[in-house]
Each structure stands twice: as C-alpha cells, then as structure tokens.
Image: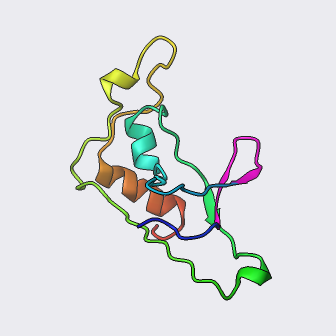
C-alpha cells in the first residue's frame, strides 16, 4: 500500500519543491544515498519531505508505509561497471556499506 493522500514532495535540483503522488497501482521509490553511489549517480538520491495537508483535509485519513532497506556492512558499494562510461565517469572511490554508514554518521555529528 502506498500513500493514500498527497503530502510527499521532492526537491528539484533548482531548489523548488514539487508534489509527488502515486496513481493507483503505482509505487513511489525514493532512492537513497547508497543506491545513488552504487549506480554512479545514474539514480539520484532525492531530498524529500512530507507536508501537512490543507486545513480542509485534516479530518481525512492519510496512510503511508515507508520501507527502509540497508545492505549488510560488508557489501561493496563500488560503482557498478554498467553505470560507468565516457559520458558518466566513475564519481566515487570504492567503499563498503559499513564504511559509508560510518562516514555518514560522523558527517551528521552523531559520532566523533
């Protein structure tokens, strides 16, 4: 089941927020930073937010079921060979999912 009402927004590269609503029988997938790295930025990690509905819709239910996946720490996040070519050279150094997560936690200030 996807979201039953509007609220999800994705930020464009120019900084504007646009609404994203799945049609019936569709699923919205937010690509995370690890997948973006694995695909050498062919799939982009999007900045997103969920906003409250207009006051007139406050009494309507809204359901959304997020599902998060994280690879095993030892999984390689090296850019996939099929995502590297002359037009899109390799953008990232080789790293494991665990190393990436450790870096991200430090960047967020959650660990020194």
Q: Residue furthest front?
A: 24
In the image, residue 40 above or below residue 50: above
Q: Viewer-proximal residue, 34 or 9?
A: 9
Q: Which percent across, then down, holds residue 7? A: 65, 67
Q: Viewer-proximal residue, 72 or 68?
A: 68
Q: To which quarter of the image does residue 5 belong?
A: bottom right
Q: To which quarter of the image does residue 48 belong?
A: bottom right
Residue 68 horizontal side relative to residue 53, left or right: left
Residue 102 horizontal side relative to residue 3, left or right: left
Tell whether position 12 is magenta: yes
Residue 48 horizontal side relative to residue 81, left or right: right
Tell whether position 101 is magenta: no
Who's the residue at 49% across and 54% down the image? 28
Residue 40 horizontal side relative to residue 96, left or right: right
Q: Viewer-proximal residue, 48 or 91?
A: 48
Q: Viewer-proximal residue, 26 or 44?
A: 26
**What segment is highlighted magenta in the picture?**
7-18
Q: Which percent across, then down, holds residue 50? A: 63, 68
Who's the residue at 43% across and 55% down the image? 25
Q: Which percent across, then down, holds residue 63? A: 50, 76
Who's the residue at 47% across and 37% down the image? 43
In the image, residue 76 above or below residue 42: below
Q: Which percent across, then down, holds residue 24? A: 49, 57
């Amino acid at each position: 089941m996807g979201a039953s009402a509007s609220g999800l927004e994705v930020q464009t590269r120019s900084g504007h927020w646009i609404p994203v609503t799945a049609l019936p029988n569709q699923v919205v997938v937010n690509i995370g930073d690890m997948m973006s790295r694995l695909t050498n930025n062919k799939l982009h990690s999007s900045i997103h937010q969920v906003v409250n509905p207009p006051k007139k819709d406050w009494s309507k239910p809204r359901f959304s079921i997020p599902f998060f996946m994280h690879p095993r720490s030892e999984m390689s996040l090296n850019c996939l060979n099929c995502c590297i070519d002359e037009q899109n050279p390799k953008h990232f150094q080789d790293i494991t999912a665990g190393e990436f997560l450790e870096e991200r936690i430090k960047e967020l200030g959650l660990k020194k």
